[in-house]
Amino acid sequence: MSNHGRQITFRQLLSDCHGIRIPMIQRDYAQGRDTEAHIRNEFLSTIENALTKASNTQSPPLNLDFVYGSIEGSTKTWFAPLDGQQRLTTLFLLHWYLAWRDERWNDFERMLVKEGKSTFTYRVRSSSTEFFDFLVAFYPEVQPDDVELLSAIVRDQPGYFRSWRLDPTIQSTLVMLDAIHDRFVNKSGLFDRLWDQEQPAITFQLLDLNNFGLSDDLYIKMNARGVPLTPFETFKAYYEQALENQFPGVTRRISGQDFSIRDFVARRFDNTWMDLFWAEAEGSKSGTSDVHRNIFNFLCVMALITRHPDAVDCLRDIVLLTRTRPVYSIFRTHGWLDETFTDTLIPVLETWCVGGGGLQALLPNQDYFDEKKSLFEDDRGFRKLRDSRSAAIHGLRFVYS
């Protein structure tokens, strides 16, 4: 993997390492967005021309230009693309589809499934990771010719979670699968062309940046062409990392299965908890921005009520939390994401989500703190904490403890 600018196929890249893992700082998969229809169709047309061309021709393979990335891990090495995520994801989906179309599923599984998990995966969200594991385990029993809308077949599976509708990478993937199906449903034998390493149909130039010391900041800057992660998504990714060093050996259950605190929080924020914030934002004009604003309101309140009143920095923390909208680095610098924070956050959100739908309020009245208004309606209620923070903090601690 040290060769610079090595011409390589998707299959060869996977044979060189354990798998391909899109880093959590990367953007979502974009080629399936409605706004990318022209680019999607042009790209698939180019791929079609390359795959339908006879392998014995003298023309060179379709070269998808440079793919930049680095190797992570020691025993299980993963290729983490810095640039080329969109092309690699589309190539993965093409392998999945053509393996099904040409009944070459065994070859696909040998290359892209290890230990029951997908060797092509996303770390951007835990829901994206789960979806790719689900997809490589799903072999449609129907014939391609009998399928009108492939995404409908996928969504109809028992293992497909309703909450995945909120994950833009998953929704973009489903759109791309439909586009691939429309273009290749009547074309057979193309998996062999995709699989061929002697006379490959599609290649790219792999540039290994493993020795460049890449940072998360560089990932963000170099992805400025796409849609960056929102402040909350960035916060969540780093928060999950922080939880890896907390609560050793402690687990919580979801549907009868035990998860570490890190995995429990990640899954809840991707599903049940996120549904709560979306339910409370329904009808708003701002949509996602309202959801993320409400989440940050909530995070600030959780940090506020878990600060010890006798701590030297308590007054400073109260001012920061009630007069600003801190980002992750502020939470980390001031030590707000401690175990007490998480020990409070989990039962509050779990209780609020009882019964599904909107917020199930915990306080008996709103004399000192209106849960709904402070977190889900506007910022005025949150700012009132500056004027009544002592009563609000004590009231919330009493109920949430």
Image (tube, rainbow, N blue to C red):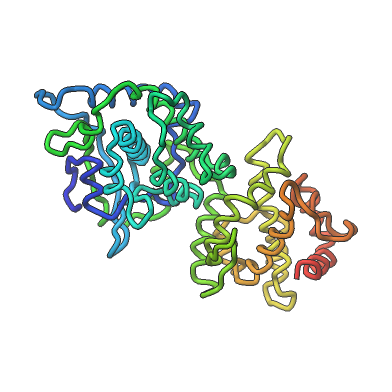
x then y, percent, for residue 156: 53, 37
x then y, percent, for residue 224: 44, 40
- Would residue 5 be visible to someone looking at this image? yes
For the C terminus, which image quadrant? bottom right
Residue at 39% of width from left, 40% of height from top? Answer: 139
Please indicate whether residue 49 sits to the left or right of residue 377 in the image.
Answer: left
Please indicate whether residue 227 sits to the left or right of residue 361 in the image.
Answer: left
Residue nearest the viewer, comparing 358 with 319: 358
x then y, percent, for residue 38: 41, 21
Tell me how many marks there are.
0
Residue nearest the viewer, comparing 187 with 39: 187
Please indicate whether residue 287 sits to the left or right of residue 333 in the image.
Answer: right
x then y, percent, for residue 395: 83, 67
Q: Could you say which quadrant of the image residue 330 lies in?
A: bottom right
Taking 123 as reference, is 50 above or below it? above
Residue at 9% of width from left, 24% of height from top? Answer: 58
Residue nearest the viewer, comparing 266 with 254: 254
- Would residue 39 be visible to someone looking at this image? no
Taking 303 as reference, is 224 above or below it? above
Taking 146 as reference, is 337 above or below it? below
Taking 207 as reference, is 360 above or below it? below
